[in-house]
Amino acid sequence: MRHFLDTPPSIDFLKIKKQGYILSTLLVIASLVVIFTKGFNLGIDFTGGTSIQVRFEEKVDIGEVRSALKLVGLEDAMIQAIGTEGNEYEIRVSLKEGKSAVVVEKVKKALQQKFGKKFEIRKIDYIGAVVGEELRKASIYSIVAVLIAILLYVGYRFEPVFAIGAVIPLFHDAIITLGIFSLLGEEVNLSVIAAILTVLGYSLNDTIIIFDRIRENIKIRGKKNLLQLVNQSINENLSRTIITSGTTLFSVLALYLFGGESLKGFSLALLIGIIFGTYSSIYVASPLIVDLENLFRKRSRAK
């Protein structure tokens, strides 16, 4: 018996392309409003702060360390396990919590109250505000550079219409992901930026697969019924989209639920990005190919 996904379905995805445009536009506008009004909860990577590496004599649960820091008002500190033995952690405290010397004393006091003298501070690093500013700029430049590189690459591999259709959804995915982070007040750090860059690559890969099938079908049937052809191409790739996005989504969901506090921001960015990346490949990138091609065709006829 053949699997039900072996035969491509005939779902009319582009029947609601206008509704898709409206939804995407509203989401992007809402995200931009939230970003500009509320801003971001920037992590130590961007604001500057203190990093303290602590090693305990015995295995200690990360929840115990966090409850100890709550005693001195450092409950917002980022705690990350180092190694696999479960007795060494990195505690990262933002510059807004005070100067490095003050923060170190608070951490020492909290750990002594909770664990006595059964720990040692192995390393203390200070990240200045200037370094944080440079990292913030570098993160913005990296995202812009990736988008420009993608625009040039897709334009070279396919056509200018496809390049525009590939890059606009990437802006869509990145802005919505950042907007949700701003709305939820989740911390934005270098790992979140890395997740967003990963999402851009994932979303582009899904889009390129559909574009490649569209190009193959154009070679066979031409561009006469482009709307129908694009719809057919999406349906032919639907099984791959469901399997790839579904398995990746479950893996990232497990990482978000069980990966611990240190991986929460990274996995959340991936989770949001995969959902909207899959959506934008079908309801933003593909309809754009049809509408841009029709627009350019009308202009060439007018000339």
Image: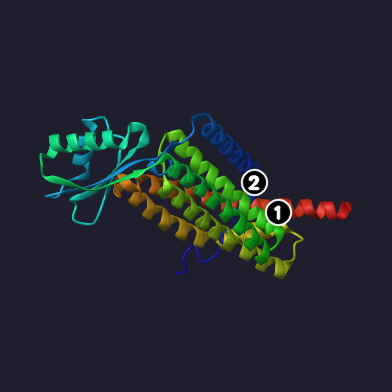
Please name the residue that numbered disc 1 is placed on.
290
- Can residue 23 be seen at all in this image of the molecule? yes
Label 1: state its secondary structure.
helix
Q: Earlier in the sequence, mark 1 or mark 2?
A: 2
Q: Measured along the vertical axis of the image, is residue 144 above or below residue 6?
A: above
Between marks 1 and 2, how big is the CA–CA gap? 10 Å
Please name the residue that numbered disc 2 is placed on.
17
In percent of width and height, residue 279 lies at 54, 49
Residue shown at 42% from the left, 48% from the top: 190
Q: Is residue 101 left or right of residue 10?
A: left
Marks 1 and 2 in Cβ contact (< 8 Å) = yes
Residue shown at 22% from the left, 44% from the top: 62
- Tag of residue 57: none
Looking at the picture, which amino acid does disc 2 mark?
Lys
Q: Measured along the vertical axis of the image, is residue 228 above or below residue 134?
A: below
Residue shown at 55% from the left, 50% from the top: 141
Identify the residue at the far right of this view.
303
Looking at the picture, which amino acid does disc 1 mark?
Val
Binning the other alpha carbons within 10 Å of mark 2 as few (below 14), some (14 to 19) or many (20 upward) gives some
Binning the other alpha carbons within 10 Å of mark 1 as few (below 14), some (14 to 19) or many (20 upward) gives many
| Quarter of the image where one finds residue 160 | bottom right
